[in-house]
Image (cartoon, grey):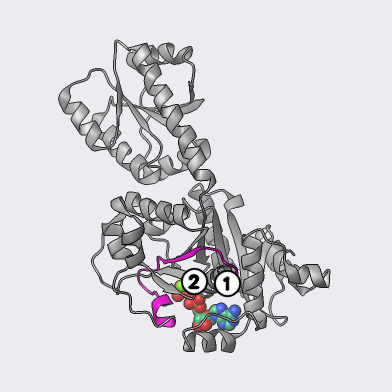
Amino acid sequence: MLRALLIGPESEIVKDLKENLAGMPGLSVSQQVERYPDRVEMGILLRQLNPDAVLLNLADYQRACQLIGHLGALRPQVPVIAVHSFCDRQVLLELRHQGVRELWFPPFQVEQMQHAVQRLLQHKLAAAHHQAGAGTLIAFLPARGGCGATTVAVNTAAALARNKHAVLLADFDLHNSVIAFWLKLEPKYTLREAIERADRLEECIWRNLVESVRGVDILCTPPPGTPMVLSGGKTFAILEYARQNYQFALVDLPDTLFTSCWDVLENSKHIMLVVTPEMGSLHLARRKLDQLQNYGIPKSNIHLLLNRCSHLDIQPAEVAKFFGMPILAIFGNDYRAVNNSFKDAKFSSDGSKLGAQYTSFARYLAGEPDFKEAKAGVSKIRRIFSV
Ligand SMILES: Nc1ncnc2c1ncn2[C@@H]1O[C@H](COP(=O)(O)OP(=O)(O)OP(=O)(O)O)[C@@H](O)[C@H]1O
Ligand SMILES: [Mg+2]
């Protein structure tokens, strides 16, 4: 069954359409919104209702076209069926140009509409099949600058790669990126070129866009100030390519939430909010948590990582209580270990305590049993994943 979201003002045409759709097998109008939502509201509706298709009334043609643009950026895979009072060549051309393949108009041709529904249903099933094998997109977001989000993202990517997983680390910190510097990379091509080629990504192009470091593919940011036009549709295409070609795509985000960050956040399966055990960080993390939820991101997608934790600091149980949610993983405070590894352009080694914590976290993400926990029974490692 295709669950359709109907958008646009109620009118005689819409009433007529709904009557025609009432008995149609394969499609049901699950929700009707009698106005044209803006981009943020549309994002929330898409996440809440998760429609298989959008039926869009073109009564206010300009606003409807604007909305088609938002839908293309937010969920390009959700087909739009335009509904209009008439059909002419110009409208058809303009809709096609925006990626809309269906236009329904009175008198409604039920048989043709039925064929279109069948076609869309087949696409839905094919997409679901494709999706089943796709990788996991995980965003790393610092509660505030310097919490250690990049450090955790880089070392988790390395630990996943050590365990033979195909991993991409995508640097989306366009202003204060350190990953290439830490790993002594001088990438010829970066996110900028990935965006330019977003519509035609394939293996031979992608290979040139990423740097490979000890099993981790890294998509670097261009030097600061490089002109670059990021759009939701292009970001989505890059993330989708990553999901289809890696088991894990880890995206490192900056502290400030730019539009490009929202494009990543709304497509991520998990958002790792990295926080340190100090009052300022906890306060700003709670603010970010609210910000994410107000945007419509479900709390269940957001996880807390407690970084730079020592027995001298606010304890994990208190932090969990403060947020009213569990802490997914805890990482110790070892400035020297982190700095030394990056001084040599390396990742934290499995041998160090901190390195072992990244490994355990990576194993958890991969759904693998934690070998140390199994050996030691209720050990310290268990505390990495529960409070
Ligand atoms: N577990 C740790 N123990 C000690 N120092 C750490 C730890 N994790 C990160 N650091 C240090 O904290 C500093 C900030 O780390 P990082 O750049 O990863 O933070 P961030 O949250 O990504 O910051 P930004 O907002 O700049 O993106 C770095 O100097 C790093 O070496
Ligand atoms: Mg960072």
Judged from the image, the secondary structure of the residue bearing numbered disc 1 is: helix
Q: Residue reaching furthest left?
A: 90
Q: How many marks?
A: 2
In the rendered structure, are the residues bearing label 1 and label 2 in contact, judged by CB atoms less than 8 Å apart?
A: yes
Q: Amino acid at mark 2?
A: Gly
Nearer to me, 261 or 128: 128
Q: Position of residue 360 (x, y in %)?
A: 67, 69
Q: Residue at x 57, y 72 (%)?
A: 162
Image location of residue 132, percent across then percent down: 54, 44
Is residue 278 visible in the rendered structure shown here? yes
Position of 32 compared to 61: left or right? right
Badge 2 crowding class, 10 Å Cα cut-off, few under 14, some 14 to 19, many 20 or more, is: some
The earlier-in-sequence mark between 1 and 2 is 1
Magenta residue span: 162-182
Q: Quadrant of the C terminus?
A: bottom right
Farthest residue to the front: give it. 204
SS state under label 2:
loop
Which residue is located at x 50 percent, y 54 percent?
268
Which residue is farthest right? Answer: 377
Residue 36, compared with residue 72, is above or below; it is above
- The residue indicated by pointer 2 is 215
- The correct choice, above or below, for 221 with respect to 105 in the image is below
Q: Nearer the viewer, residue 189 or 224?
A: 189
Amino acid beneath label 1: Arg
Task: State whether residue 228 is above or below residue 223.
Answer: above
Residue identifier under label 1:
162
Q: Residue at x 41, y 59 (%)?
A: 261
Q: CA distance from mark 1 to mark 2?
A: 7 Å
What is the x, y in percent for residue 93?
A: 19, 31
**Left or right: 32 in relation to 386:** left
